Image (tube, helix red, strand yellow):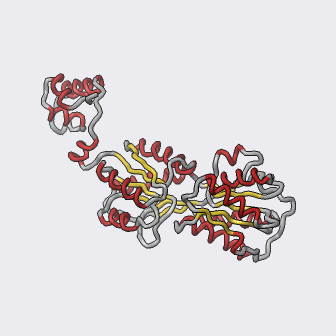
Amino acid sequence: MKGISIKDIAKQAGVSPTTVSFVLNGKAKEKRISDQVSKKILKLAAKLKYKPNQLARGLRTGKTKTIGLIVEDIANHFFANVAKIVEEEADKFGYKVLYGSTEDSQVKAKGLLEVLEYRQVDGYIITPTPNLDKEIEQLRHARKPMVLMDRYLPQIPTNYVMVNNFQGAFDAAEYLLKMGYGKIAVVTITSEQIQMKERLNGFSAAMKTHKAPFPRKMLKKIPFTATKEEAVSQIKAFIKDIPGLDAIFFTTNYLGIYGIESLKELGLKIGKDIAVISFDDHDLFRLHTPGITCVAQPIHDIARNLIQVLMNELSQNNHQINQVVLPATLVKRESCTKSVSLTLEK
């Protein structure tokens, strides 16, 4: 179905397309168009359900009132919730959001950036994939309003919003030690992403600080591309290879969910036979019996800061770098219930 155009409105209003354009773009008074004509045009536009062509508007004004949001996986609980709130916050400023998932693929990320450039988005919110440095640098040099989320590129000075991954993982390890767990494993992904490195570094630092053993055999890395079945199989084999294992820290919520399934298939009871902590909260963790302890990210604060930083970029010309690091929160639930609480050695 063909959309209503400015020419259609002009024909019915008995005025020129230029007059309609001025009215719809808020320039009626500036161009000395009478209130009577303005009201007639606006009433017709509403009646005909006119929707402006954002690409055409962008060519005229340099602004499309759209934002590009690139995330790792829009189906992931964390990214989906951030995206929802980003949309709500952007709407307050009159912006619409176009988004897509990279699945941690540089090729897909580059393709999405090309699409967003074609759509002439006014600004970008990007979860960068590995090796996306060149594209991010190009956006920066072109002075495109941009903010990175969830992770940053250490070698490129950019805006970003993320949580303190190091401290969140440190707190998780320290909590397990205080609860009396001694043989603690980590399940993470094979990734060079800075946030995953910081989570592993934070956990390792806590173990070292409290002189707790953390040998290489207690660390399992699952390929990002592994299917659910492959990941569950690998986690099960890992757990069976460590006699006496009494706690596991999963560095992402989807790994935590795979872990729950793995433990169930092995016949191990969470909170009784083994403790579980996951980085990132999830509805399943709250509803699971027992509840799963987690390091929760402040999703609302992340989304609001992303939009605020981007709006500052869009409204200012100085492009001052704004880097926001928010605290994560340890949410204690019944998956860690060892009765002996220890005073840690420091």
Q: In which quarter of the view is residue 178 placed?
A: bottom right
Residue 314 showing in the rendered view = yes
How many circles with numbers are drawn on the protein? 0
Q: Nearer the viewer, residue 38 or 54?
A: 54
- Residue under the point 80% across and 68% down: 182
Residue 253 appears in view:
no
In the displayed structure, 59 sits above or below 319; it is: above
Q: Is residue 56 left or right of residue 175?
A: left
Q: Residue at x 64, y 69 (%)?
A: 202
Residue 239, located in which quarter of the rendered image?
A: bottom right
The C terminus - image quarter: bottom right
Which quadrant of the figure contains the N terminus? top left
Q: Which of these two is toward me, 15 or 283?
A: 283
Pick the residue in front: 177 or 44: 177
Task: Choose between 253 and 52: the one closer to the eye.
Answer: 253
**On the image, which quarter does residue 18 sit in?**
top left
Q: Is residue 66 above or below residue 124?
A: above
Q: Residue at x 29, y 23 (%)?
A: 47
User: Could you say where residue 144 lies in the image, as x and y percent from the top left?
Assistant: 32, 59
**Rendered location of residue 212, percent (x, y):** 76, 74
Position of residue 169 measured from the top left corner of the image (x, y, whole percent): 65, 64
Task: Give percent across and percent down for residue 244.
Answer: 82, 66
